[in-house]
Amino acid sequence: MNSVRRIILALGSNIGDRERNFADALKALSSLIIIDKVSSVYSTASLLRDGQADYYNICCSGCTGLSTDKLLTFIKKTEKELGREQSARWQSRLIDIDIIDFGGEIHESEGLAVPHKETANRSFVLYPLRDVDADYVHPVSGMSIDRLIAGLKDDLDIKKIGDLSWR
């Protein structure tokens, strides 16, 4: 039996009703994750700045008894059930869910790296992450969330949109 771990997930969407996509995802995730915090919604330009619709992004934190690999399987199943279609990397998507932190542990397996390898470079993860854990310290670099944000090279024109109603 796995022990309960505190986790942080990042969600992104740039197709359809982005806030509804988040609400639907959080409700689905709640079947196996006790979600205790959800960040404000943030808007950014696409990572490639290629004319895609702006992305909305949030983070949520909570607890689960799933292992990292079972959590990833659950997330991928949830994305598919919500209508995500496989697309090329960095292309528009209805919903994208990434594991950002898993109990402060470092985990690498085929198809999964926790913390997510690009966390420290992505404003759309760091700003919402600070909302759910202002004391977050990156388990690899040892840097605080505020230091990570200060070190961003491109914030992708991030803007706080507001709070999400999902329950």
Image: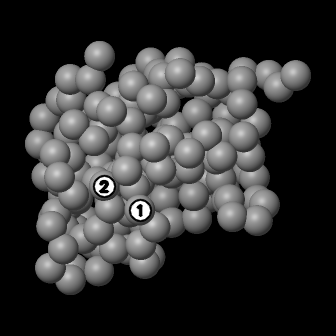
Which label's residue is closer to the chain start, 2 or 1?
A: 1
Q: Nearer the viewer, residue 125 or 141?
A: 125
Reading the image, the residue beneath label 1 is 85
| Residue name at image x 29 percent, y 80 percent | 48
Q: Name the mark nearer the viewer: 2 or 1.
A: 1
The amino acid marked with disc number 1 is: Glu
Q: Is residue 23 left or right of residue 115?
A: left
Neighbour class for label 1 at 10 Å: few (<14), some, many (≥20)? few
State yes or no: discs 2 and 1 in contact (Cβ < 8 Å).
yes
Q: Is residue 162 visible in this depiction of the protein? A: yes
Q: Residue furthest right?
A: 1
In 3D space, how far apart are the residues under numbered discs 2 and 1 (Cα atoms)? 8 Å
Q: Say which quarter of the image contains residue 53.
A: bottom left
| Quadrant the N terminus occupies | top right
Q: Position of residue 19 (x, y in %)?
A: 20, 39
Neighbour class for label 2 at 10 Å: few (<14), some, many (≥20)? many
Q: Position of residue 149 (x, y in %)?
A: 36, 56
Instruction: Give the structural element (helix, strand or loop) at label 2.
Output: loop
Q: Position of residue 143 (x, y in %)?
A: 54, 52
Reading the image, the residue beneath label 2 is 94
